Image (cartoon, rainbow, N blue to C red):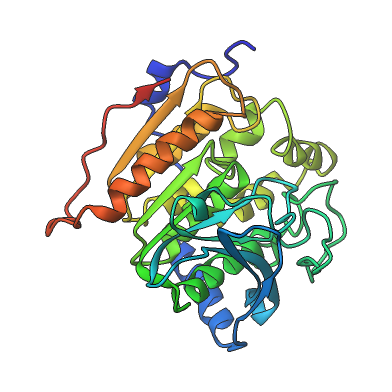
Amino acid sequence: MPLTDLTLAECLALRPDLEEPADLDAFWDSTLDTARAHGTPPRYTLVDTGLVQVATYDAVLPGFAGEPVRGWLHLPADAREPLGCVVEFLGYGRGRGLAHEQVLWANAGYAHFIMDTRGQGWSTAAGDTPDTAPLAGSVPGFLTRGVENPRDHYYRRVFTDAVRCVEAVRAHPAVDPEKVVVTGVSQGGGIALAVAALTPGLAGVMPDVPFLCDIRRAVRVAGLPPYTEVAEYLSLHRDRTGTVLTTLSYLDAALLAARATAPALFSIAMMDEVCPPSTCFAAYHRYGGPKDLRVYEFNGHEGGGGHHRREQLTWVRELLTTPRPADADAPPTPHAPQLA
C-alpha cells in the first residue's frame, strides 16, 4: 500500500487556499433556523438487547424539516446523574445497525448516541431513516445526489439531521449538555466537523480520517470511492464542473472547520486512498479550536483502528474531567502530531 498523496512533511506544511462561498454562513443559518421551526418532540423507547450493564433506547429525533431520524441511545445501566455523552456519526453506507452492537462508550461510563444516516445502511426491526428527497441524475452513491444546487444536496439534509440530533440529545435528562463530544470515522468524521462548526458549546470533536474535506482536491486525487462518484459524474456532464464544485463547497467540512471552537482530536492515515491525507490535513490546519493529532503513517482508510480508539478513550476522559481554562477561547496552539 504505497503513498499516493503528499508526504507527511508536505502535509504538515500544507496551507490550502480553499474557495469559500460568500454566503456560507447565511446558508447554514437559514437551513438550521428552518429545521428548528419544526418542533416534533423526541421519543425514546427502552429496548431489550440482552445486555444487563447497558440500557438502550430506540430514539426517534427531529431532523431536517422535522423528519424523523432514528438512532440508539446507550446509557450505563447504573447511571444516576447526567453524564458526559459521545454522539457518533457513521461511515459511508452504514446505518445504525443492531441495538447491541456498539456499546464501548457506554461501558466506559458515558451516554452514547449513534445517529442513523438517512438513506444508508439496512433496515432493522425498528425501521431506519429514509432519505425523503431522492433526486434523479446522480451516479450511484450519495455524493452527487442534488449536486446541481446546494439547497438540494443530500449532505445538507444529513448535516441538519446531525445538528438537530445533537441538540435533542443535549436536552435529554441523562446527558450533561456541557459535556457532549461528537465523533465519527470517514463520512462520520466529516459530519462531526460540520456539527462542531454549526453547534456552539460542544465539549469536543474527534474526526477520524474525515471525508468531505477539501472536496475540490479530493475529487481529483482520490483513487477509490466515494470521491470518484463526482469524477464519474463530471466525466458525463462535462459542462457542469463549476456548478458541481460550487455546490460541494457549501458542504465542505474543511471550510466549516474554521468556525469550530471545541477541542479536537484528529486522526489521519498517510496511505489512505479513500480520504487522501492532504484533504484531511486541510481540515486539521483550518480547524478553529484547540487541536491534537494522531498520524498513522502505514495505514490506509482503516486508520488507527483499536489503537486509536484507546487514544480516544484517554482523550475523552481527560477532556471531560479537566476544568476548562478561563482563556479557552484564546487562539489555539496545535500540538505536535504523534506518529503511530
Q: Residue at x 62, y 46 (%)?
A: 187
- Is residue 77 among the parts visible in the rendering? yes
- Is residue 287 among the parts visible in the rendering? no
**Number of numbered discs:** 0
List x then y, in percent, for residue 287. Answer: 36, 46
Q: Is residue 241 above or below residue 275?
A: below
Q: Is residue 176 above or below residue 323?
A: below
Q: Is residue 21 left or right of residue 43?
A: left
Q: Is residue 177 left or right of residue 327?
A: right
Q: Residue at x 53, y 15 (%)?
A: 298
Q: Nearer the viewer, residue 160 or 82?
A: 82
User: Going by the picture, which residue comes out furthest to the front?
Assistant: 52
User: Going by the picture, which residue comes out furthest to the top?
Assistant: 2
Q: Residue at x 40, y 72 (%)?
A: 80
Quarter-wise, where is residue 156 in the image?
Answer: bottom right
Q: Residue at x 65, y 65 (%)?
A: 71
Quarter-wise, where is residue 130 in the image?
Answer: bottom right
Q: Nearer the viewer, residue 292 or 57?
A: 57
Q: Is residue 174 above or below residue 194?
A: below
List x then y, in percent, for residue 241. Answer: 69, 44
If the image is split into quadrants, where does the N terminus sit? Answer: top right
If the image is split into quadrants, where does the C terminus sit? Answer: top left
List x then y, in percent, for residue 126. Answer: 79, 69
Quarter-wise, where is residue 25 in the image?
Answer: bottom left
List x then y, in percent, for residue 299. Answer: 56, 20
Q: Nearer the viewer, residue 243 or 332?
A: 332
